[in-house]
Amino acid sequence: MKVGIVRCQQTEDICPGTKCLAYARDGKEAYQEMGNVEIVGFISCGGCPGKKAVARAVEMEKRGAEAVFLGSCMTRGLPWDYVCPHLDRIKESLKKKLKATTRVIDWTHS
Ligand code: SF4
């Protein structure tokens, strides 16, 4: 399955995405149910308030992503215990702009 990952831009300075990428490679944590995944894109939300996340996710979908993972930095506030305050709005927009068949998974790892 082809997937894309969206991450929090605010977190980039302290996390290069190591766990998100390793768990995808190994099919663990949030990726477990997908079997082997191929990452077609690993993008940030573009910074607050995250509007660019939607356009960027659509581009990953055009490149074959069948699922879009929202990084745990956004949805679980890792590693700073700071969940994205714009998360609901971003998810709402993703639902409107992505195909109905494209899954949005709201975590990557614990
Ligand atoms: S919109 Fe959310 S995910 Fe994006 S930089 Fe701001 S806090 Fe992080």
Image: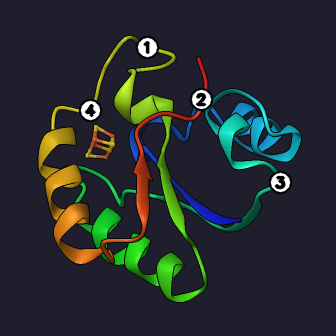
Q: Are marks 2 and 1 in contact (CB under 8 Å)?
A: yes
Residue 13, x across and y down, in percent: 56, 37
**Three-letter amino acid code at disc 1?**
Trp
Q: Tell me the amino acid under the disc marked 2.
A: Ile
Question: Which amino acid does the dot numbered 3 rest on?
Answer: Asn
Q: Residue at x 52, y 61 (%)?
A: 67
Indicate which label's residue lies in the foreground, 4 or 3: 3
Q: For residue 14, which numbered disc appears in the image?
A: 2
User: Which label lies toward us, 3 or 2?
Assistant: 3
Q: Position of residue 71 (x, y in %)?
A: 50, 39
- Going from N to C along the chain, the mark reached first, 3 or 1, is 3
Residue reaching furthest top? 81
* Residue at image mark 3: 36
Q: Residue at x 32, y 18 (%)?
A: 82
Q: Residues within 10 Å of mark 4 (few under 14, many from 20)?
A: many
Label 2 sits on a secondary structure element that is: loop
Q: Nearer the viewer, mark 4 or mark 2?
A: 4
